[in-house]
């Protein structure tokens, strides 16, 4: 028999959890006390409850394991709503533990206590309030299963404070004992039909979404592309699933600026998608002309509710992206082809000409020596300095103009939280300490999370934060320009010298005004092995906020 607070920690240890992200609060002190009595799990204390969930989210996205957050109930738990909503929309397995009002208080007539599990019910795959300390471990197992099975996503566990000291005798098991780690194979008949449709296609396109990331299926996707000699597009916010310089990559959908992807996808006679939800940003609205009226869709998704949800499909396959890809590849190899048809070769040659024209179009601003610095010059120099080992978290408005992403670029658009990519990057760096991890934020976004630089300093998390300083909320200002006749309100701000502020918070920091200084500053920041901030003064003119045709 052990106290429930200790059982929770033992459960996390058994699952191999290395970090718990949270904020100290009276409601969770018994759990923190149990964490303090062991050494295999480190508690990362943050400034805001929202940050705890965001760091757990960034950790989960890179480690491919649940990220654990711990907060006190009431206002503390309420502070996590937007961050948990972002994890839900992006399918990230964050598990949030929170204290809740004592069971005796909830049962008392006239109590103002609320069941927080109801608050999170629509933002999680599973939300529960522990009803009995003697069966709490079973609740933990269900929470873990819900977060990691099928389409992944967050889960919530509320624990009444009066239960934490009560004892439980339940056996604590590794997740391999209480959840199936295997995946059911896809229907072989559907695999056969999809393979036959692909082999007959003259203009196939492979579309990769977030499910491909969680399935770690990039290698298989490239194998399929090479077998079919077909281009690969990525859904919005999923740049870098395959490198942009991969010959068959045409970049991401979701921007009118990326004409390579738009024109190639519009011409496709067959589109096979893996783990793509076809959200409104990927489909531009959805745009009626995104696909040809005669296009045939093969949709593969681990979540059956996604199949045919937004577009009519020819074949729908429920299954994990990597295993379905392997099944299709095996079937295609059994069928065999000796060479690509000439029409397929001609088609790819046309795609490559578009790609070359695209790179030529944007090479000048990417080399610009203008001051203030052009945003595309900053992105290009950052990408070149990071190399292939880097990971970038950020909302990069000009990313679609720069087809040189050799690594994951992790964006979050469906339910964005201002400044989220800084704590994302902090969690990711703890998961992958040997890789350079960068948070790319606008100055307004950075101001929203500036205090979390102290978290990185306190816990020695050596991430690099790039702050693009133009004194405005660029996206909103561009929209006011386009649709509101330039009536600007609430978008222009006189921010302080953010490098100086970061130095005061304990970080290494530099301010860059000359484009020739970008790469040396980034290199010094990466080499310092400390939390670092490089503030870059970029052009805030209307023309540089967004591509004019985006």
Image (spheres, rainbow, N blue to C red):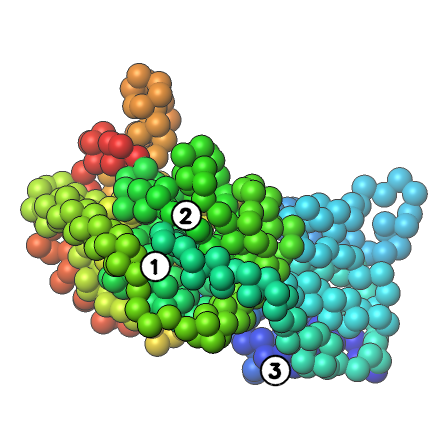
Tell me the quarter of the image containing the N terminus.
bottom right
Does the CB distance between marks 3 and 2 fall below 8 Å? no
Does the CB distance between marks 1 and 2 fall below 8 Å? no
For marks 1 and 2 on the same chain, the one whose residue lies earlier in the sequence:
1
Q: Nearer the viewer, residue 546 or 21?
A: 546
Instruction: Specify the quadrant of the image occupied by residue 473.
Output: top left
Location of mark 3 (residue): 38
Residue 465 locus on image (x, y percent): 31, 57
Residue at coordinates 36% horizontally, 52% vertically from top-left? 203
Location of mark 2 (residue): 269
Q: For mark 3, give the secondary structure.
A: loop
Q: For mark 1, give the secondary structure.
A: loop
How far apart are the two marked residues, 3 and 2, measured between alpha carbons? 58 Å
Q: Is residue 511 left or right of residue 493?
A: left
Q: Is residue 414 left or right of residue 239?
A: right
Number of other residues with Cα within 10 Å of mark 3, as a class: few under 14, some 14 to 19, many 20 or more: few
Location of mark 1 (residue): 230
How far apart are the two marked residues, 1 and 3, measured between alpha carbons? 52 Å
How far apart are the two marked residues, 1 and 2, measured between alpha carbons? 12 Å
Relative to 294, is 134 above or below?
below
Residue 275 locus on image (x, y percent): 52, 57
Tell me the quarter of the image containing the C terminus.
top left
Give the label, 3 or 2, closer to the camera.
Answer: 2
Give the label, 1 or 2, closer to the camera.
Answer: 2
Residue 128 locus on image (x, y percent): 76, 57
For marks 3 and 2 on the same chain, the one whose residue lies earlier in the sequence:
3
Residue at coordinates 79% horizontally, 71% vertically from top-left? 138
């Amino acid at each position: 028999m052990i106290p429930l607070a200790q059982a929770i920690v033992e459960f996390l240890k058994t699952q191999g959890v290395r970090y718990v992200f949270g904020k100290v609060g009276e409601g969770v002190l018994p759990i923190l006390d149990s964490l303090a009595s062991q050494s295999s799990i480190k508690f990362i204390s943050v400034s805001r409850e929202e940050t705890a969930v965001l760091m757990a989210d960034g950790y989960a996205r890179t480690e491919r394991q649940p990220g654990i957050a711990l907060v006190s109930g009431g206002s503390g738990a309420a502070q996590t709503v937007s961050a948990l909503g972002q994890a839900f929309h992006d399918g990230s397995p964050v598990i949030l533990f929170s204290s809740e009002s004592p069971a005796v208080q909830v049962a008392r007539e006239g109590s103002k206590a609320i069941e927080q599990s109801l608050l999170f019910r629509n933002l999680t795959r599973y939300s529960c309030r522990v009803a009995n300390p003697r069966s709490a471990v079973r609740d933990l197992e269900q929470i873990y299963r819900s977060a990691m099975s099928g389409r992944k996503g967050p889960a919530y566990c509320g624990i009444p404070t009066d239960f934490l000291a009560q004892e439980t005798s339940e056996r604590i098991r590794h997740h391999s004992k209480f959840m199936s780690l295997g995946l059911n194979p896809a229907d072989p008949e559907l695999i056969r039909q999809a393979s036959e449709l692909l082999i007959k296609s003259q203009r196939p396109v492979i579309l990769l979404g977030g499910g491909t990331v969680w399935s770690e299926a990039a290698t298989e996707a490239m194998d399929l592309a090479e077998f079919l000699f077909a281009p690969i597009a990525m859904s919005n916010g999923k740049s870098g699933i395959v490198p942009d310089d991969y010959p068959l990559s045409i970049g991401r959908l979701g921007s009118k600026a990326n004409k390579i992807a738009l024109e190639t996808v519009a011409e496709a006679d067959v589109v096979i998608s893996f783990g793509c939800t076809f959200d409104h940003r990927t489909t531009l609205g959805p745009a009626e002309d995104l696909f040809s009226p005669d296009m045939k869709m093969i949709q593969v998704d681990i979540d059956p509710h996604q199949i045919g949800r937004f577009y009519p499909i020819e074949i729908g396959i429920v299954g994990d992206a990597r295993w379905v890809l392997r099944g299709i590849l095996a079937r295609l190899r059994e069928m065999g082809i000796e060479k690509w048809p000439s029409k397929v070769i001609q088609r790819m040659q046309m795609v490559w000409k578009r790609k070359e024209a695209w790179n030529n179009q944007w090479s000048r601003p990417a080399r610009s020596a203008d001051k203030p610095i052009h945003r595309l010059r900053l992105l290009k120099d950052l990408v070149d300095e990071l190399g292939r080992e880097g990971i970038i978290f950020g909302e990069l408005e000009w990313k679609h103009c720069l087809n040189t992403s050799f690594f994951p670029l992790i964006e979050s658009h469906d339910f964005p939280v201002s400044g989220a990519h800084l704590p994302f990057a902090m969690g990711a760096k703890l998961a992958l300490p040997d890789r350079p991890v960068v948070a790319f934020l606008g100055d307004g976004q950075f101001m929203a999370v500036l205090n979390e630089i102290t978290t990185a300093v306190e816990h020695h998390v050596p991430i690099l934060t790039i702050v693009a300083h133009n004194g405005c909320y660029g996206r909103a200002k561009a929209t006011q320009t386009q649709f509101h006749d330039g009536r600007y309100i609430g978008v222009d701000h006189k921010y302080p010298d953010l490098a100086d502020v970061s130095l005061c918070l304990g970080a290494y920091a530099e301010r860059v005004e000359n484009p020739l200084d970008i790469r040396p500053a980034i290199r010094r920041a990466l080499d310092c092995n400390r939390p670092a901030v490089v503030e870059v003064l970029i052009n805030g003119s209307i023309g540089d906020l967004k591509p004019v045709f985006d």
